[in-house]
Amino acid sequence: PFDVLIVGGGPAGAAAAVYAARKGIRVGVAAERFGGQVNDTMSIENYISVQETDGPKFAAALEAQTRSYGVDIMNLQRADKIIPASEPGGLAEVVLANGGSLKAKTIILSTGARWRNVNVPGEQEYKNKGVAYCPHCDGPLFKGKDVAVIGGGNSGVEAAIDLAGLVRHVTVFEFMPELKADAVLVKKLHSLPNVTVHTNTQTTEITGADGKVNGIKYKNRETGTESLLPLEGVFVQIGLVPNTEWLKGTVDLSKFGEIEVDAKGHTNVPGVFAAGDCTTVPFKQIVIAAGDGSKAALSAFDHLIRSPIA
Ligand code: FAD
């Protein structure tokens, strides 16, 4: 069995693996796709000490460093179920989609999250070519340009306020008749001179030419009128979904499906820890996920040295 088994191989899982392996214990990582969301990222300019890199390069570096510590990387493995230890100090089990199972004294869950897509024509085609999901990551790329934000909940309105300080103009599209964000955010949004809000509006297509976004098509749901707005960027902000469906019923999740963790990365199940975008830890970023993964590994080690000897 592993001393520490990590499920998920993004920045959180890789950092957890490196920190755990440096304690000289037996560490494994089972991941559906090693590298995680970073694989889908073009340019990364906010990982401290690395001025600029791209996603595939960053993912390859994560894997190389993790392997250099002799960590057992089991890539292309999806976990389907977790069975907590039946007694303190006992082994927990992770059942894989391929039918296999892995046993470990401690488990770190770092299965990340995925952005919800709006599923209109052009979204997939222009991903990373004007279609973006993370204002903290990609906002500066649109400096001085016109952009849209799809989604008028808290994340959409926060994104619009953030972007309004960087870009020339922001247009917010909300499907429902009213913005769903907190009143204080809506008030702030309406106070900004370079923001337009369309409520009760359905976005129908993201248009482009020469491999990049050049507009958005939308329909007024009351009048049925269709319009085209020329612009250079579209931020889709209709939700970040944690990859935690497989944990329902075993590990406590928030109403958004995020794994509930304390400041040290403990879940409600003894010996099971969690880190990164799949948890309640706020602000989903690489540097945060990496810090969080290292914290969870140190907590797992702490748990191991305090466990009764079997
Ligand atoms: P993830 O990166 O999501 O990794 C999750 C891991 O778990 C993957 O290996 C996945 O395959 C695996 N997994 C999921 N479910 C299972 C399962 N059931 N069984 C086994 N394995 C599973 N952040 C920045 O800081 N800067 C940026 O510039 C930036 N740009 C971004 C651009 C895009 C397009 C996207 C999508 C995100 C961007 N982010 C950026 C956010 C950043 O990528 C995430 O915050 C970070 O990757 C989270 O790391 P994580 O390890 O928690 O999860």
Image (cartoon, rainbow, N blue to C red):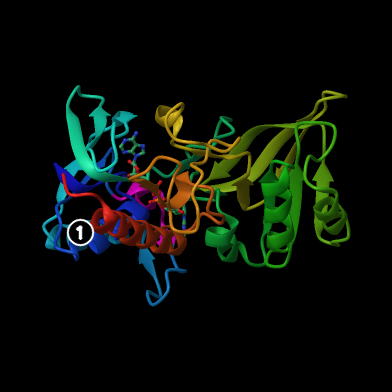
| Residue extending furthest toward the left | 70
* Corner quadrant of residue 89: top left
The residue carrying mark 1 has its beta carbon less than 8 Å from ligand 1: no
Left or right: 86 in relation to 190: left
Q: Residue at x 40, y 64 (%)?
A: 291
Query: Is residue 179 shown left or right of residue 46?
Result: right
Residue 258 seen anywhere in this rendered image of the structure: yes
The one nearer the camera, 146 or 177, is: 177
Residue 229, quarter of the rendered image: top right
Q: What SS does tag 1 mark? A: helix
* Quadrant housing the N terminus: top left
Work out whether residue 59 can be spotted. no
Task: Identify the residue position indicated by label 1 in the image.
Answer: 66
* Residue 287 horizontal/vertical position (percent): 43, 64
* Identity of the residue drawn at 26% across and 63% down: 19
In terms of depth relative to the viewer, which is nearer, 248 or 244?
248
Q: Which residue type carries mark 1?
A: Thr
**Position above or below: 97 against 292:** above
Q: Residues within 10 Å of mark 1 (few under 14, many from 20)?
A: many
* Coordinates of residue 271 in the picture (x, y in percent): 33, 45
Which residue is more in the foreground, 225 or 137? Answer: 137
Q: Residue visible at 23% across and 38% down?
A: 90
| Quadrant of the frame with the C terminus | top left
Residue extent of the magenta highlight: 35-43
Along the line of sight, the residue nearer the viewer: 12 or 64: 12
Q: Across the whole image, how many numbered discs are drawn on residues?
A: 1
Q: Is residue 89 above or below residue 118?
A: below
Point out residue 280 in the picture as x, y percentages from the top left corner.
54, 48
Question: At which x and y percent is residue 95?
Answer: 25, 28
Task: From the viewer's perspective, tell me whether residue 250 is left or right of residue 31.
Answer: right
- Confirm whether the magenta stretch covers residue 76: no
